[in-house]
Each structure stands twice: as structure tokens, then as C-alpha cells.
Image (tube, rainbow, N blue to C red):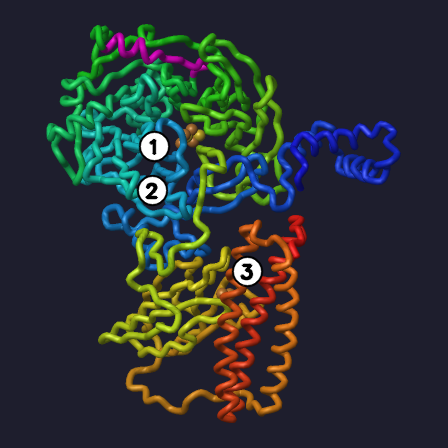
Amino acid sequence: MKFSKKRTLSLLVGLTLGLGAASSAYSQQSLQDVMKARGLTQKDLLAAAKTYTPTGGRDEYIAVSSGGQSGQLIIYGIPSMRILKYVAVFTPEPWQGYGFDDESKAVLEQGRINGKLLTYGDTHHPAFSETNGDYDGRYVFINDKANPRVAVVDLKDFETKQIVVNPFFKSEHGGAFVTPNTEYIMEATQYAAPYSDDFVPLSKFNEVYRGGLTYWSFDKKEGRIKKENSFVFELPPYSQDLSDAGKGPSYGWGFTNSFCSERYVGGIEKGRPPFEAGCSQKDTDFLHVTNWKKAAELVKAGKVKKEKGMYLIPMKQAIAEGLLYLIPEPKSPHGVDVTPDGTKIIVAGKLDTHVSVYSFDKIMKAIKEKNFVGKDPYGIPIIGMKTALHKQVQLGLGPLHTQMDSRKCVAYTSLYVDSQVAKWDYCEGKVLDKINIHYNIGHLVTMEGDTVDPDGKYLVSLNKLAIDRFNPVGPLHPQNHQLIDISGDKMQLLYDMPLPLGEPHYVVAIKADKLRPEIRYKSGWNSREDKRSKWRTRAGREKIVREGNRVDVYGTLIRSHITPEIIEVQEGDTVSIHLTNLERAEDETHGFAMYSHNVNLSVEPGKTVSATFKADKAGVYPYYCTEFCSALHLEMQGYLLVQPKGYKAEGGFVEGQKYTKADYEKQVKTNVDTQAVIDSVVAFITSHNYKDFPPVVALVEDATDQLGFAAEAKKKAEAFAKKGDWQNATLWAGQWWQYQVKTADLGLRAKTYLEEHGAKKIK
Ligand code: K7E
Ligand code: CUA
């Protein structure tokens, strides 16, 4: 467990070389046996040693991947490539209760477009929040290409908090990218469309259809996008593509690619050449250069008009104020990436074998000297390509995206057509290394590779096609994320990870120790609004409140019961079940599922969530906890009874089993024996330095709680016994035992932990 990486490696290598080391003959043989049986080479073993993570081990980096059309985010560790979580963003997801509880439904509701609720998103580019151009580990943003929206995910709990809809665009792609202090989140259009929601014939394409670039204002303290402070650059109907924000010397500026500056409109069904022909005819398209800092000042000074609840900067105003410039770039470009020092802008063109490196200094000089080669049809000044270029470097076929290394001037660019990654020097303009990937790479990511201070180390290649890489699972293949070691001079392929959800476009990777997610919510927390829920309940305060046809159930969840266990309502009532998880222990989530009402909740420790539904059919509806939370999890259950209109109550509870004094005494004996086991475990724990182990301290805290509950149940049992009510006495004695079992379970977990982590005896 405590072996250093070096030590583990030398151990492995030593064993495989097997130079007559008779003393370790057994393990030597077994490792070679495995190699032989599985057909593994020395190189494979080395790669395995670089990625294999023993049980309980952690990853150095956490990757946040777009989930493509799944509308989610995928979280995985690097270098282990183990998937840790899917985060529901634009799409309902039952495990997280997302889109099922009222609180998260309200988030999805924010994303309605034209009154329609959308239950998917086409996610492309996740972006971490930044402070001084470096990841600060607080938020992640993700865009939806199909329905121009941006979502905010808080890394405190990896939950989606907000979705904003772009009121001008009908499609987007160049987002989410953040400015160096997360002042703004960039979002550029893809397919031009009218800003209004009206019908506009294609004959008016040049005059009325528009592209655009939104700078969404972000309030870092509150963790929310502020639409009312955000602004949009009106842009020509070119297909704007990716964006990146300037940093260092280029701070205050943004860069946005485009293709189809031909403004071609297809019509293949009418015999016109298709979009793809008309959109790739010219030799160059345009890089849009925008001055967001100056734009923000204009907005602040009240010089920009508001429309649809945000600021819209018309092209005329942007040109007059010197906020907007164009620079030709080789045809059909895709990625645009600013170098860590902010001095250069790297543009890769799908249909050009070169990567173009623009110099920010040269761009500024041209602007200062008004050195323009002309204007586009909308009057935007054009800076000459040669004027702005630092270098063009021939890399290979289909260069798309670029990421940076920790080494100065070193970058990695994906080559889609060549199915390769090129490592190259953007200062000198020379290729350093190439590696084959499988197959057709889109984006790639290096560790913290788009910050001012990249870590390098690993690169993940996001491949579009997997073809023959994995066991076949039908015509729809998983994606293939390939892990590459870039720490040496030569790139080394380490691992293939099938990603079984959506087509992820981009991934960002952050140093794991920058993240400090919470392990529980403050008690009674509405996690989507980040405040105490008005529906929260404390233990013993559970209640059912009726007001006309509305019934509010204030309930709680704790191992292993749901309070209330019986809910009686009348046909036609609107029922709202509000559940608070009372647990303080780590990883004690309870679920709540109920027959036939599409009610399915996830209630993490401390959280309060609600499910509102119409009880429109009389009947019996069992509900239960969906998370295997303790040995008595299956008993964590209850009934919703929907009584027919005019129903008159008959009878009370029917006892299935009658208990006697003997039953009570038998149960008490069991409890006394159980207490002895608990005492021995407690003695073990307290005789060790358990306080040096925070996970054990948390377990002990939880166990103490459970013992407290046991004591309460014991009191009840004894009170009933005194009255000779053996029925209730026996049942409460049983409940007393249930809490003991939970205590013992926690205690044993703590004991195992101490044994496995070499705890020392202290007395
Ligand atoms: Cu290249 Cu949406 Cu960034 Cu796909 S995008 S690859
Ligand atoms: Cu709570 Cu199972």
C-alpha cells in the first residue's frame, strides 16, 4: 500500500526480468504465467503499472467529460480511467433523482425553449471555472449545441444548479469557454438563424440570419450566471465555431473561429449542391477577434441597448467602438486555442494540413495602425492573414484541436484524418513526435492543458471511432478514450477506455487535490437552490398536513425506516412528499420509489427533496428505499393508501403475529448478547489510535448515534413491559436490536479499517 510508484515499478520489472532470483521464484513464476497466458509484453506491464490503481487508491487527476447527446457529464479518474460518476445536466437521470424531484425539475424547467420542456442536450465543451487563468476547482460549465443553452455544475456536490437559454441563437457550438477569472462564459453560434422566433425565408439569409457570440456574466460568489449582466455580439451569418479566451497579454480579448463564411445555403433536394460543397469553396474563413473587456465597460456605462433581457451589441456599434475584427484563416478551421502565455493563438483547419499560429502582438499592432486589408460585407475590418501570422506548421491531415504541455512551446494537436496525435513546437514550428491512435481523434486533453500553467503528464485522445477495439456490443459502439503518457520525449499509449454513453467531444482534467466536494449536506438542504429547504423536517417532527385538496407529507429517512410508513390520502388529492435524510454518515443515501407514479428520489445525507403528484386513482401503492442502506434495507418500506371518495375508515391495524412475555424475554437476551459483541468491538477501537483516522472517527460518530437510538427503543420496550403489553414490548425490543445491529455493522467496518491501515495499540 505504501510503496512509492518507483518501488512498485522496480518490483514489477525485477520480477519480469527474472534473472535467476530463486528467492522470489513463486511470484516470479506466477507473473510470467500471467504474461504468457494473456499474451502480455514487458511494455504492456509497464503501461499497466502506470495506470493500475490498487484498491482504495486515488487518481491524480479528475476528468470531466462531455457526455455528448446523453446531455450529461462523465467524471473519471486519470490515470486509472475509472468512471466515477455521471452528472445529469440536460437530461433526466433516475439514480440522481434528476428530473424526478421537484427541486431538480425546477432546474430542467429553466431550460424550456418556446415553452417546450427538453429532455436531452448535445453537450460539447465542459469548462472549469478559473482564477487568474488557472482552474480553481469550483464550477464546471457545459454547453448544449442543439438547444443553445449553458449549464452550471457546482463542484461542491457535482450537481447541476442552473440552465440558461440563449434567447437569440437557434444553435451554438463555441462554448463553454471561460475568461481567466470566470468573468464571462463564452458561447458562440454554429448555424446562423434569425434572432427572432419568426419565420424568415432563406432568401433573406444575408440580411436577417445572424451568427453571434454571447459573453454570459458569471457571479462566482453566488455560483450563478447573471443573464441581466450578459451581452451578445451580433455577428455575420458565418458558422461560428470554437472559441477561446485570451490570457496574460491577450486578457480582455476573445477568439472565435468560423466556417462557411461563403454563407452558402444548401438545397440538395432541389438539385443544389449540398452544404458541404458550398461551405468549403473559399480558401479561407474568418477568425473573429472580440474585445470583451471594452464591451463590458460600454455595457456598464449604459451605452448598449437591452433586448430579450440581456445586452445586444449590434455589429455597427461593435465596429464603431473597435470591439470586433476578422482575420482570414485556412479553410474550414475547427479548434482555436490560446497558448498558456497568451501570446499566440493556434488555429487548426480540418481541410488544411497546416496549423496556423497567430501572434497576438501582431494582431494588436495591426489594429493600432489600422492596417486592414479590407472589410467583410458587413463592414467588419479584416486584418491580413500574413500580417497576423507568427508561423504555419505542417502537421498532417485533418488537424482539429490543440492542447499544451508543461514544457514551454510544446503543444499536442489531434489529426483526425491521419488518426494521430502530433507533438510539436509552436515557437520554432517543428514536429517533435507523432503517435497513432485508434481511430479518428477529435479533441484531446492534457492535464490542466488549457490553463496558464499546464501540467502535461498525460494526454487523453477522444476518438470518434472504436471499430475493432472492444468486444462487440452491436452496431452502436462505445467511444474510445485512449490514455497516453506524455511525460517523456516519446509519447506512449497506455490504455483504451470504452465510454459507453454519448459522443463526448471535449474533456477537461483538473488536479484532484483542487477539488473538495462535501460528503453531506447541511441538514434539510435544498441542494439545487443552495439553501435550507422550506420542506425540511427534523426527527420526531414528521407530519402530514392537509389544506383543501393538497396534502403535504413532511417525512424523514434514516436507517432503516421511512417516516411516515403509512400515508393516507383521498382520490383526487395532490400529494407532495417531502423527505429529509437525517443521516450524518458518509455514503448513507436513501432512495424512494413508489408504485406507478413515476416517483423516484435520491436523498443524500442532509438533503431534502420533494415529489409532487396527483393521487388520481384509488388504490394501494407500496413505496420503499432503493439504496441498499443497511441489513434491514428491504424493510425500509411503506404504503400510500389512496382512499376512494367518501371512504369511511374501518378497523385499525391487524397484527399478523401475537407476542408473549417469553418472546419479549428471548429478544432481550439476544440484545444483551449483541451488546457484548458491540462492547468488544468498542474495546478494540478505543484501545487503538482511531482518532488518527478521520474515516474511523466518522464511523464511530455514526455508531454512537445508532446506540443512542437503541437506548431510546430500549426505554420504550421496558415501559411497555412494565405495563405487561408484551406485543409492543417485544416489537420495541426488536427495534432496539435493529439499532444494535447497525451499530455493530459500523463498528466492524471501523475495526477492519484500523486493521488494514496499521493502527497502533495505545493502551
Ligand atoms: Cu471538435 Cu464540438 Cu469541439 Cu466535436 S467539437 S470533436
Ligand atoms: Cu434506505 Cu435502503
Q: Residues within 10 Å of mark 2 (few under 14, many from 20)?
A: many
User: Can residue 270 be seen at all in this image of the molecule?
Assistant: no
Instruction: Give the label on residue 700, or none.
Output: 3
Q: Is residue 667 left or right of residue 117?
A: right
Residue labelled with disc 1:
175
- Magenta residue span: 352-367
Q: Quadrant of ligand 1?
A: top left
Of residues 94 and 522, the one nearer the viewer is 522
Point out residue 272 in the picture as x, y percentages from the top left corner: 32, 26
Of residues 238 and 736, the one nearer the viewer is 736
Q: Residues within 10 Å of mark 3 (few under 14, many from 20)?
A: many
Which residue occupies the extreme bottom position in the image?
724
At mark 1, the secondary structure is loop
Q: Is residue 337 left or right of residue 548?
A: right
Which residue is at a point 43% across and 18% down the rendered structure image?
Answer: 351
At mark 3, the secondary structure is helix
The span from disc 1 to disc 2 (Cα, nearest Å) is 11 Å
Is-magenta flag for residue 360? yes
Which residue is at a point 53% across and 69% down the rendered structure image?
Answer: 707
Mark 3: amino acid: Val
Point out residue 462 in the picture as x, y percentages from the top left corner: 51, 31
The span from disc 2 to disc 3 (Cα, nearest Å) is 39 Å
Mark 1: amino acid: Gly
At mark 2, the secondary structure is strand
Residue labelled with disc 2:
151
Point out residue 399 in the picture as x, y percentages from the top left corner: 46, 20
Q: Earlier in the sequence, mark 1 or mark 3?
A: 1
Which residue is at a point 49% across and 72% down the rendered structure image?
Answer: 709
Numbered marks: total: 3
Q: Is residue 274 left or right of residue 203?
A: right
Which residue is at a point 41% across and 68% down the rendered structure image?
Answer: 596
Q: Nearer the viewer, mark 2 or mark 3?
A: 3
